[in-house]
Image (tube, rainbow, N blue to C red):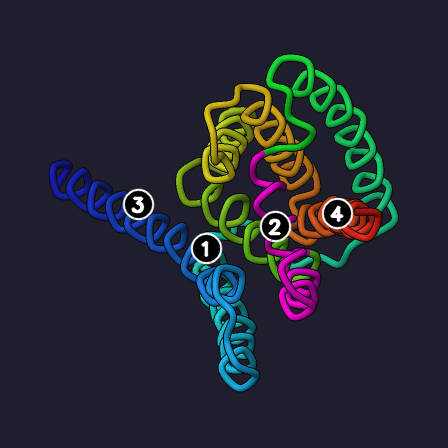
Amino acid sequence: MKLEKINFRNRQFNIRVLIMLALILMVFLVQLPVELLTVKKFNGLVSFLLAVIYLLGFSLAIWIAYKVFQKVNPYPYKKINRHDILLMFEWVLIFFGAEMVFGLLNNLLYRQQQTANNQIIQQVVGSSHLTLVLMVITSIFASPILEELIFRGYFMNAFFAPNDFWEPIIASGVLFSLLHMHDLNLINFITYGTLGAILAYAYKKSKNIKVSIGMHFLNNAFAMLMMIIQILNN
């Protein structure tokens, strides 16, 4: 009986690993249409169809992520309250301060004005009016939902017990950072790891995925605004 329980737990763990890998693959796949629009010029109809596929793909990905998140979510449904809102703004401001320090170190040590991930996003945003609109929609609204459901909502609950605190926070930060890395830059790794850990901390403290989604929304909205201003100035 004990051996059967161990085998069952191993099967459950393996299934969750496969689900997590599939979710990570999905995050990259949904970006393909907008990447195509960035590297090649299409006629109006093809561009429109790619844009529709991109938005529908994101919507489907969010729905899938939400369904698997529901399977492991240990917390009851809660609305965002005043304390949650204060927590969101408090930790977003803390991250903005940390990001400024990391930015100075990045410029000093690696001669980079921004992270490699942000450079890629800026290239996509600046390639055409269509990609600009699509990236504003998805980066500010869709990506925070999708990434929080996966990296906080599913990952932290599928692989850690509800009473675990720092272990899932650190693990979530590391995983989040690894998947946003496009070069071997330690400062960039620490920057995204810090953001992921702060989002994970807010989720664990509030026990409400809406809080980390809201924080992610604020962070991406500010980052996108800065990118657009920089593009316009150039």
Label 1: which residue?
Answer: 27
x and y, in percent, of residue 99 in the image: 73, 27
> What stretch of residues is rendered in magenta?
116-139
**Which callout, 4 or 3, points to the residue nearer the camera?**
4
Left or right: 160, with 147 as reference point: left
Q: Quadrant of the N terminus?
A: top left
Label 2: which residue?
Answer: 123
Report crowding for label 3: few under 14, some 14 to 19, many 20 or more residues within 10 A (C-alpha).
Answer: some
Q: Earlier in the sequence, mark 1 or mark 2?
A: 1
Left or right: 117, with 136 as reference point: left
**Which callout, 1 or 3, points to the residue nearer the camera?**
1
Label 4: which residue?
Answer: 227
Q: CA distance from mark 4 to mark 3?
A: 35 Å
Name which residue type carries label 3. Val
Q: CA distance from mark 1 to mark 2?
A: 19 Å
> Residue 67, can we see it?
no
Q: CA distance from mark 1 to mark 4?
A: 22 Å
Label 3: which residue?
Answer: 17
